[in-house]
Image (cartoon, rainbow, N blue to C red):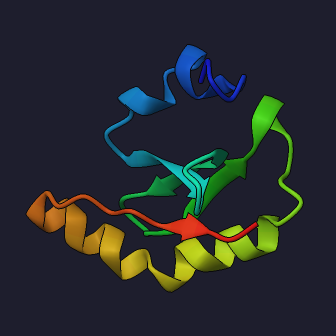
Amino acid sequence: GEAMHHCVGKCGYWRKTSSICVGIRDLQGKRQATAEISLQKFSIIQCYTYCDKVHDQDEEIRQLIMDHMHLFRNATEGEQEVQLAIAV
């Protein structure tokens, strides 16, 4: 939460067992957004950029996550890492 100046860290979202927090970066590795994904429904609970704002490419980011949701489902079953990048 400190790097993006939003509530993920200070509100303890990262401690939840019912969801995961995912950092979204651009192709150069710069932080773009953080999304919270439900591990029960495999849906996006929330997705914000710096200072809890909506990213200019929010729809594209959400679509990228949804298009690859199967990777998050598989990762919860097999403990593998998921890396996605968005071109901005």
Question: From the image, which quarter does the N terminus lie in?
Answer: top right
Q: Tell whether 23 sits left or right of 45.
A: left
Between 28 and 18, the one nearer to me in the picture: 28
The residue most toward the left is 78
Compared with 35, 58 (above or below) is below
Label count reads 0
Q: Residue at x 40, y 47 (%)?
A: 20
Where does the image place residue 19, in percent across and percent down from the top left?
A: 41, 48
Instruction: Give residue 60's quadrant in the image.
Output: bottom right
Question: From the image, which quarter does the C terminus lie in?
Answer: bottom right
Compared with 51, 17 (above or below) is below
Between 15 and 68, the one nearer to me in the picture: 68
Where does the image place residue 63, in percent across and percent down from the top left?
A: 65, 79
Q: Tell whether 6 sits left or right of 14.
A: right
Between 54 and 17, the one nearer to me in the picture: 54
Compared with 20, 50 (above or below) is above
The residue most toward the front is 28
Where does the image place residue 40, in percent across and percent down from the top left?
A: 37, 62
Where does the image place residue 65, in percent across and percent down from the top left?
A: 55, 72
Compared with 53, 1 (above or below) is above
Q: Residue at x 22, y 65 (%)?
A: 75
